[in-house]
Image (spheres, rainbow, N blue to C red):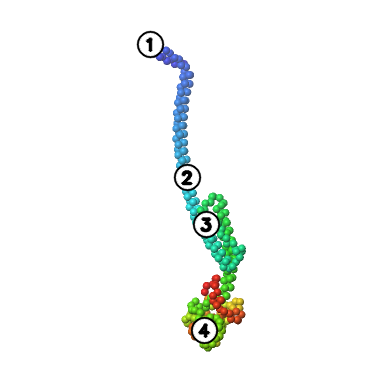
């Protein structure tokens, strides 16, 4: 089968013969080419559009992740600042513990070699620094060292407390201070002119004068061995303490304790008066060591370290 094409040109005609098989192949190729071009164009259009959408999605994801990272960094910074303040507070307390430990050690006259209260590297106080730890074991190790240091200092303070407590207990039984917060020393220990007989005699104690019914307190903890009237002394209270010490409080208006009673340091045991050989309201204080009179002045002026009357 053939197709004849006539072409008119200046009254001339030409004819072409085209084989139908070739024509069919040509038409098929042309259609395939058109379809391929259309498909390629559609594919490229879809690919570009899809890539653009994917790109925009990834950009949004990256922006979201960036915001999340910034938020986490801000939260961590806030947490780090919070813990920094906490650690500064802890370090300040450790510094106070060190200061207290040093004072107690000095007060108790302890060997510094036995108790180590040296100052660690603080993050608070004068040597305050910024805390910036990486996310590894440094921060945890720092906290562990601080806990170990606190535990060590706690043990040291516990030992110091035992010593201080023992010293304080001893001081409770050691006579010290004045038997009255009010008044003045009207007559001292030693030879003096007797206000009644007008003759010289040895005054075995110290007189503290004030108003009648002024509180009279015990100079130390102990046991009441006498409470009653005695010639010359009037109303008298005698208290026995450790290590052979005794204290006597005389000329009382009235006694407030009984024989056999245990009293504390600073406890009110009588009221000031003028009973016995007395010319006015006062308390006559005597201190004895193994039943021998000693000068009360060194006990009156003894500087206490723990007890407060």
Task: Determine whether 7 is above or below 228 in the image.
Answer: above
Q: Please report the residue visible at 58 percent of the width from the left and 66 percent of the height from the top.
A: 105
The mark that comes first in sequence, 1 or 2, is: 1
Of marks 3 and 4, the one in the foreground: 3
SS assignment at label 3: helix
Residue 232 shows up from this direction: no
C-alpha separation, residue under disc 3 versus residue under disc 4 = 61 Å
**Which residue, given by chain and number where applicable, does mark 2 sit on?**
66
Q: Position of residue 209 (x, y in %)?
A: 49, 81
Residue 13 shows up from this direction: yes
Tell which of 157 and 55 is nearer to you: 157
Q: Residue furthest top?
A: 11
**Which residue, given by chain and number where applicable, does mark 3 sit on?**
127
C-alpha separation, residue under disc 4 versus residue under disc 2 = 90 Å
Of marks 4 and 1, the one in the foreground: 4
Tell which of 42 and 273 is nearer to you: 273
Residue contact at pointers 2 and 3, CB within 8 angstroms = no
Tell which of 20 and 51 is nearer to you: 51
C-alpha separation, residue under disc 2 versus residue under disc 3 = 37 Å
Residue contact at pointers 1 and 3, CB within 8 angstroms = no
| Left or right position of 52 against 143 | left
Q: Position of residue 206 (x, y in %)?
A: 53, 80
Q: Position of residue 218 (x, y in %)?
A: 54, 78
**Which residue, given by chain and number where applicable, does mark 4 sit on?**
251
């Amino acid at each position: 089968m053939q197709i004849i094409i006539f072409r008119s040109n200046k009254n001339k005609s030409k004819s072409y013969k085209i084989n139908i098989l070739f024509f069919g192949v040509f038409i098929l190729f042309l259609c395939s080419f058109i379809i391929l071009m259309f498909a390629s164009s559609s594919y490229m259009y879809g690919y570009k559009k899809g890539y653009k959408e994917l790109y925009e999605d990834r950009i949004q994801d990256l922006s979201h992740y960036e915001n999340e990272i910034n938020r986490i960094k801000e939260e961590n910074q806030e947490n780090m600042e919070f813990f920094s303040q906490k650690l500064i507070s802890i370090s300040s307390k450790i510094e106070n513990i060190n200061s207290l430990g040093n004072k107690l050690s000095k007060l108790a006259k302890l060997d510094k070699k036995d108790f180590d209260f040296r100052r660690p590297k603080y993050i608070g106080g004068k040597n305050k620094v910024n805390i910036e730890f990486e996310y590894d074991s440094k921060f945890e190790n720092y906290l562990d060292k601080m806990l170990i240091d606190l535990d060590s200092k706690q043990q040291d303070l516990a030992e110091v407390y035992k010593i201080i407590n023992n010293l304080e207990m001893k001081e409770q039984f050691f006579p010290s201070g004045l038997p009255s917060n009010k008044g003045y020393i009207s007559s001292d220990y030693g030879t003096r002119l007797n206000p009644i007989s007008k003759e010289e005699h040895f005054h075995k104690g110290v007189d503290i004068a004030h108003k009648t019914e002024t509180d009279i307190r015990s100079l130390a903890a102990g046991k009441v061995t006498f409470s009653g009237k005695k010639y010359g002394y009037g109303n008298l209270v005698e208290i026995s303490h450790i290590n052979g010490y005794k204290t006597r409080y005389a000329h009382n208006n009235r006694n407030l304790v009984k024989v056999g009673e245990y009293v504390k340091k600073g406890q009110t045991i009588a009221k000031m008066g003028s009973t016995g050989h007395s010319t006015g309201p006062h308390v006559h204080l005597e201190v004895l060591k193994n039943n021998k009179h000693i000068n009360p002045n060194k006990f009156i002026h003894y500087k206490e370290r723990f007890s407060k009357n």
